[in-house]
Image (cartoon, coloured by chain):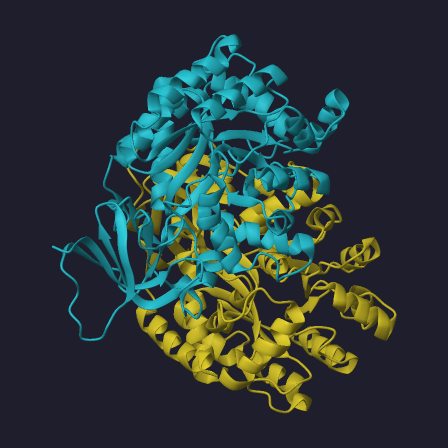
Chain colours: A cyan, B yellow
């Protein structure tokens, strides 16, 4: 056999540098790798392959990359809405986490989130949470690709009762998971400049540097944070992180809503990346990040859903749609973040922002086969003039039919093949009973 | 038999004045009418009924009401995106309409839109377009409820080559469809204050008044329109319409983005209603309507998707989600338009805005049985603390399992029962081929 899998009869949106779209094409896969991407030839037989998958004229595109989430927080989906960030965090999320986050709840919450992501076309996520060891086990079971950051915060946290041990715990986790499985990339996630001391931030970043891994941090999310950082350090949040030496090419700043042109220059100058999380930033009314400004400054930008307690789902199609639309109306310019640009944020640019663009983010020979097949045979996807438009403006997660990660089918015909999602839904519903009753 | 249909084992979100939610309840229907809404009693047998429908613990709620759309424009979905309103209208939509809108294309475009709406839980829409006679036939075939406005514009339009005949054509259409079918409510839809002369606007409104029907008009959509109306009439668009005597309780102003406090006072004083169309207003970067201000002023407000050429779908779940989030971030206040408030806009308040709240918009005895059943057995709807939160923030159209209009099941287990959607998709795809090639 020449190939392991051939996906044929697909409308291929490659997201390669030329943004090639092949109207009727095939993707040929060997092992975990894309070997060929080409148009179909009339009357030519299909290539030899162990498995032939008919895309039925649907769209074949790179798997979506969610650059910011907190997987176990699916447990808290819809528990508390319509509240300011600080009240939501301090009165609802932190107490619920203190009481209900443990190995079991993290396991099932993470699997639930993995299932939701897979069924809506996300093949890679970038996570930050606690008891991240359990998150990693869940992600490995689910079969998706993930950058998984162990949380660091200067309060007692799930799995880290003594904050003095926070960076050491994260470092131990990183050592355990580094190079263990090819799809899991350990990382360190400092919660924020206002919940971690300067000493903690520096120590955590030093650990990340010595391990050569991604360092993630929420930064410049709210106006309150900006004012508070000005008060305490006479700096912007980004300026403060720069002073501490936190900004480099392996730092991912999450949110970056309250930034000024000098902050953008700093981020750009250090080559740091940004993950925005539009729906969460809107729902918590944090503000609107100047995304076009980031792009214009050459900053790598990815799109995240945030934890689904503040969104309240992990649907990257809806995230693309809302990101494009809010940026347009905020700039009063409908040409801003057109469909192709926002699709790139959710694929190749997301991959760049977490340092994985040599492996994923586009359908190109040599890259890992992380891709999804979209069923376009639906009323809301008809007629079809421009596939990219439909992906961003017409679709939602339910359009996804099949999902492949590193050559392995993890969703087939809308069914997860790697674990029992019904069991996970039952387990999380039980855990939620306990959370609801306090 | 006591009832025609009983829907049982449902989590009933009634949207009645008390906003009652029944955790495990039933809705009993006779003919087109809801007769009883009540909790289930353990061990009590189900009532006698011709048909028993098990909601399987899913949410039973009023059908969604889309207060602004242009049904045939599904033909142009994704044809032209990321453009300013005037360029999009003048260079793409108007020419495409002039060339490709005819009885056949209106019929299939309307059926496609009906199918999309039904499958995503919309039971009533308020439309405005041309060749509205064909729209009405399609809507009747589909079995949804609709206010259908014949378009009036001072240019040659599809089906109205001579603009001198525009109001007369609309009046003839109204006479033909008035009281013909109980689910179809004819209306007159003037395109806008800038495409209709004062004379046309007045004549059209007079016709609507004499027929006692809804008068719809796009108004105050863009900054350009506001500036132009100031230039030409030294008024705001709303002030200008007031001068012409257009504002009364049977006028629905669509968009109302560029309004000032005095405009809001005028609208409120005359008892006119507003349909916002958040996604369209964002995508075309028209602006953000002061929705909370409308509500505070006692104005009836409904939610519309607009035509799906400018959205690009008819999914009212996504419309609710985006409306809540954009209003929150625009006000920098996450308590604005909470989940229950926005759910009301899409149901009972939508019904009020088009004058149908005595019949629809809530699940209450005496009202028509327009309701939908939501499948909550999905990863992205798990766990479930608060159904209203999931409806607004977690769901999208694909969560809809069943749809009933006036006691008749028009979608059963995600399949349309009233017409062949596959045929319609094939026909619209063929029509789109012609549109794409000019």
Numbered disc total: 0
Is B214 drawn above or below residue A211 in the view shown?
below
Q: Which residue is pictured at 36% across the width and 77% down the height?
A: B427
> Left or right of A187: which side holds A258?
right
Q: Nearer the viewer, residue A235 or B142?
A: A235
Residue A288 percent location from the top left of the image? 65, 44
Q: Which residue is pictured at 41% across the width and 33% down the height?
A: A147
Q: Residue furthest right?
A: B234
Q: Nearer the viewer, residue A392 or A208?
A: A208
Residue A399 percent location from the top left of the image? 37, 54
Q: Which residue is pictured at 62% across the width and 30% down the height?
A: A85
Q: Which residue is pictured at 57% across the width and 34% down the height?
A: A253
Q: Nearer the viewer, residue A332 or A1?
A: A1
> Left or right of B292: which side holds A366?
left
Q: Residue furthest left?
A: A1
Q: Quadrant of residue B10?
A: top left
The answer, for residue B14, to whether it is visible in the render is no
Q: Quadrant of residue A233?
A: top right
> Left or right of B111: which side holds A197?
right
Residue A198 percent location from the top left of the image? 63, 18
């Amino acid at each position: 056999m020449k190939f392991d899998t051939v996906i044929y009869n697909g409308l291929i949106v490659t997201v390669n540098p030329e943004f090639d779209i092949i109207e009727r094409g095939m993707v040929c896969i060997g092992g975990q790798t894309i070997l060929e991407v080409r148009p179909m030839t009339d009357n030519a037989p299909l290539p030899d392959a162990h498995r032939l998958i008919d895309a039925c004229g649907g769209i074949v595109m790179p798997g979506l990359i969610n650059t910011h989430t907190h997987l176990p927080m699916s447990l808290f989906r819809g528990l508390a809405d319509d509240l300011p960030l600080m009240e939501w965090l301090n009165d609802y999320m932190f107490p619920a986490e203190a009481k209900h986050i443990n190995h079991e709840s993290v396991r099932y919450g993470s699997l639930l989130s993995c299932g939701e992501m897979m069924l809506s076309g996300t093949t890679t996520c970038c996570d930050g949470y606690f008891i991240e060891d359990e998150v990693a086990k869940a992600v490995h079971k689910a079969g998706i690709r993930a950058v998984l950051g162990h949380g660091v915060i200067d309060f007692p946290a799930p799995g880290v009762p003594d904050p003095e041990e926070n960076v050491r715990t994260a470092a131990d986790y990183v050592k355990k998971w580094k190079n263990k499985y090819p799809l899991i990339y350990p990382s360190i996630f400092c919660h924020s400049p206002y919940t971690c001391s300067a000493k903690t931030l520096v120590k955590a970043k030093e650990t990340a540097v010595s391990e050569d891994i991604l360092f993630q941090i929420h930064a410049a999310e709210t106006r309150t944070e900006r004012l508070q950082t000005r008060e305490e350090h006479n700096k912007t949040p980004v300026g403060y992180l720069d002073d501490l030496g936190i900004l480099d090419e392996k730092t991912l700043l999450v949110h970056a809503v309250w930034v000024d042109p000098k902050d953008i220059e700093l981020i750009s100058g250090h080559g740091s990346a940004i993950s925005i999380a539009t729906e969460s930033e809107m729902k918590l009314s944090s503000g609107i990040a100047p995304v076009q400004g980031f792009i214009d400054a050459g900053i790598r930008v990815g799109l995240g859903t945030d934890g689904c307690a503040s969104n309240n789902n992990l649907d990257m199609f809806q995230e693309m749609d809302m990101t494009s639309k809010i940026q347009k109306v905020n700039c009063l310019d409908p040409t801003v973040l057109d469909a192709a640009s926002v699709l790139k944020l959710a694929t190749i640019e997301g991959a760049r922002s977490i340092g994985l663009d040599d492996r994923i983010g586009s359908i190109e020979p040599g890259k890992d086969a992380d891709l999804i097949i979209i069923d376009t045979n639906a009323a809301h996807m008809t007629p079809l003039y421009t596939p990219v438009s439909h992906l961003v403006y017409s679709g939602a997660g339910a359009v996804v039919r099949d999902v492949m990660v590193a050559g392995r089918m993890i969703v087939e015909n809308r069914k997860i093949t790697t674990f029992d999602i019904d069991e996970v839904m039952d387990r999380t519903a039980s855990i939620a009973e306990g959370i609801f009753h306090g």
